[in-house]
Amino acid sequence: MTRAGRGITLALLLTALAACTASSDNDGAGGDLEDPGDCIPVDMAVSPEKLDLLTDLANTFNDSDRAEVDGDCIFVRVQRMSSGTGASLIADDWPDPDVNGPRPVIWSPASSAWGAVVNQRKADLGEEPVAPPGTPFMLTPLVIAMPEPMANALGYPETPIGYADILRLANDPAGWGAFGHPEWGPFRLGKTNPNFSTSALHATVAQYYAAAGKTGDLTLEDLNRPEVDQFARGVESSVVHYGDITNTFLNNLYRADSRGTGLTYVSAVAVEEKSVIDYNRGNPDGILDPGENPRPPRIPLVAIYPEEGTLFSDNPFIVLDSDWVTENEKQAAAQFEEFVLEPQNQRRVLEFGFRPGNPSVAVDDPINPRNGLDPNQPQTTLEVPDPAVLVGLIDKWGETRKGARVLLVIDVSGSMGDSGDESTGETKLDLAKRAAVSALDQFKPEDEVGLRIFSTEISATEPTDYVDVVEIAPISQNREVLASRIRDLVPTQGTPLYTVTEDSYRDMEDSFDTARINAVVLLSDGRNEDDRNDDIDALLQYLRGQNEGTSSRPVRVFPIAYGADADLGALQRIAEATNAAAYDAADPTTIENVFVAVVSNF
Amino acid sequence: MTRVVALVAAIVMVVAALLIRARIDEDSNRDGTAQLVCATELEEACLDLDERVGGLEVTIEPAGTTAARLIGLPDTDIDDPGFDGWLVPQPWPGIVDGTRGRSQLEPVLEGEVTEVARSPLVIAMREERAQVLRDGACGGPVAWPCLGDVAGAPWADLGDSAIPGTVRVTHADPTVSASGLIVLAQAATEYFDTLGVTEITSFELETTDAFIAWLTSLENSAPPSAAPFERMLLTSGTEYDAVGTTEAEAGPLLDEASPDLRDAFTLLYPDPVATADVVLALAATGERDDDIEGLATGDTALDVLAGDGWRVEGEPLAPGLRRNVRLPAGTNLPEDAGVYVALQDAWRRVTR
């Protein structure tokens, strides 16, 4: 691959990324930004895992006499922005700050690769680059996090473990039984979607390197070698489900651990090393809410540094060259960058579980064996492939990823006829229909998808609360029918939420396909309005009972709480009972982005 | 009448004086500061200089970026090149002059440059990996010819199966980075020296198949990096096994590194020592020669360069610089700027 050819292929990657990274819940600062007063505001968009750390450093900086340039005070404000979403927004000149948060002066994605992505996109448009090479201010390697007893069963810490071992385990019909632990069931891998998540992209790169037996110069030819393809499919076959953020797995594992069922939820999760520390501290999502009292899990995780090598997230500090950034703001940003790189602040970086970006600060506590980590690992860092190869890799992942079998369950109760977007006059149902039709394009042809709608007494015959509008079938066969039926939906009566949830779960379980991710996507805009079945505890008990244990056939329910009146609390509990995740679309105009995030699980 | 004439003359003189003063003030406002462009390798020193002296406007950018702009500057704009002086390691001013000359363009730089500071070129490695090569494949001190031979080979094949992966060698991108180009020139010079060629020409670079094969092996074991030595430290040597750079970059950084990194890494000074020589090239306009020369080569400038790890005549060595290194009279690198352009072309051809 020549350097000159990279632009074209990178444009393809960007198209894929832009299509898939337009959404991430809780991205952007919303309307709660602190007032900078008369100071120079320096807005900083950072990837979610370092939000707390950067907020902490910004607060310290803002209160110090360092926050000054040419006599003006500086006020740094930090907002959460997933790397892929940030790249898309910056490449598009950050549209709609009211929705996406203020235009940043500083951007810190998880990896420098995202800066190159933005610049390439600009170059393709004939525009100047806007993301100069940023200084890495902290690092964290990708690891395979495993519950300690499972890692021990594989020979940890003495025996090096790699992707080849995971493949063997994933392909072994005996599962953990081959290692003397049949009670743990089959090997289950937690891995996010590489279109969204830096750790997933790195994990997929590492997986392909392992399959090709290389540590650098991964080529398109390598990706297409039959044995490499076979390796990739083997590893993917063990995936629980995908998704946009690794926190979903760690939160679910933490909850399962507290119930004593963690070992049957997931066997390993591809995450950044820092996340292992957070989990073992009892803070699985890495964000401590006010009043939250972290409690370490019963079974800690340990970090496996794949023996084939891994990649670092290098967290660059990029001061943007965009039109909206003034020279004054650049100077102010440089002040903050200098501050962040100072040894005392790099020690704060370390406290938060990242490796320092200033070589004068040694890798030290908490990166130690007590937290399941090894400061002397990794031994090999893998080379980030050419953009063309990354494009091919993401495309290949789309083909080799585990197939899905999904029942879309859509609320057509009367309230769905309420206004969803006053500016266009569209109802909530109008917006949901458009988003659902659009989301169908994200499934691969072999995925099986069906459509069920629900509302009280929607059917004259039993079951009266829901109707299967389109039977589950490969989407290559029923995509048009699904789209057509979705477009035809009209609002009707009340919301029999619990009944449709339980029945949908049962139906999917009855027809469970072990080779696929079996899931229900449940969109609802209201509370359960069915007097005949209003016992959520019974529902949750049923879902948990079916979902846990080695012989279970786990169906994941991914609810979408749609509109301000949706029962987000109940839907979250439903998601948690099935070790899935709930999505909040309280603002109906965000439903399209939320659907993208939900379908990223497949 | 005479008085009237005298009065008019006096008024004219006063008005003229006022006009001239106004013009001077205007010029002073417009061009009140000397504009200095610094190569990225000199960023710290130039920013320090900017802080410590007045009358200077500093721009930091890669040498290749400045060179591209100056090479492309039309003759019609030569009176306003956008800078007064360029502080950069050799041979970049020569590359600009030579390329413009071949394009029949007027010189944008004054012919003579002023040497300001120097730094020997080094190879940074983890000590135990360097020892594996000394004991095995290199059969003695680690040098570029040997690194090119072993680049991309599994460490297990070189005598240490405990080291995972292959030998990965890198330096900064020689098409944009001053240090990257000099390191590449050092590698090529050492290689041709093994063939008995003491003075490389563009013709040899283009026609020596063995060199192209060797260069292909050397340059494809790892991609280039903007700050390869810092990256090497931050990843504890797991990303690169050997990095070519200047002592000015690596020495102070290693000296300030945490003790475990200081103990783990070593800087090798290939024999014969080759140097990066920083020069001040002045704009051909010559408008602010005295200002910029005074600022960029004055005592303060020399002080900050020395403090930043460069070797300056009469200035103490910064921490982290080796004391017993004897610098050659010249750079020990090719003098012809055309050779460097040919090297850049060869690098582009062989890299993936």
Image: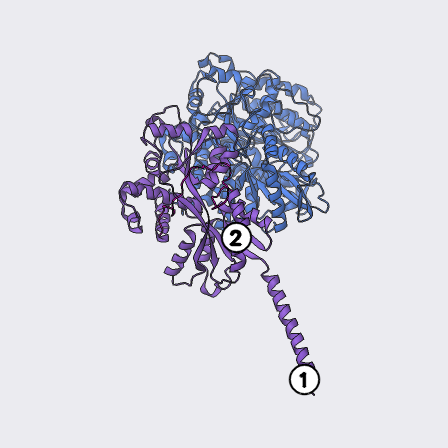
Chain colours: A blue, B purple
Q: Quick check: B253 left or right of A81? A: left
The label number, if any, that marks residue B323 in the structure image: none
Displayed quadrant of residue B159: top left
What is the chain identity of the residue bearing mark 2?
Answer: B
Amino acid at pointer 1: Val
Which element type, helix, strand or loop, lies under badge 1?
helix
Q: Amino acid at mark 2?
A: Ala
Task: Say which quadrant the N terminus of chain A sits in.
Answer: top left
Which residue lies most toward the top here?
Answer: A180
Q: Give the residue at x 53% y 17%.
A: A148
Nearer to us in this view, B97 or A56:
B97
Label 1 environment density (alpha carbons within 10 Å; few <14, some 14–19, many ≥20): few
- In the image shown, does A587 or B239 lie closer to the viewer? B239
Which element carries disc 2, helix, strand or loop? helix
Predominant SS of the magenta segment: loop
- Asked whether residue B97 is drawn in magenta, I would say no
Q: Which residue bears the numbered disc 1?
A: B5
Q: Nearer the viewer, residue A509 or A72?
A: A72
- Per the rendered image, the range of residues in magenta is B308-335
Above or below, comparing residue B191 to residue A361 in the picture? below
Find residue B249 and report its horizontal and vertical position in percent.
48, 40
Can you tell which quarter of the image residue A301 is in? top right
Q: Find the distance from the CA under tag 2 to the CA under tag 1.
A: 51 Å
Place residue A89 in its image quadrant: top right
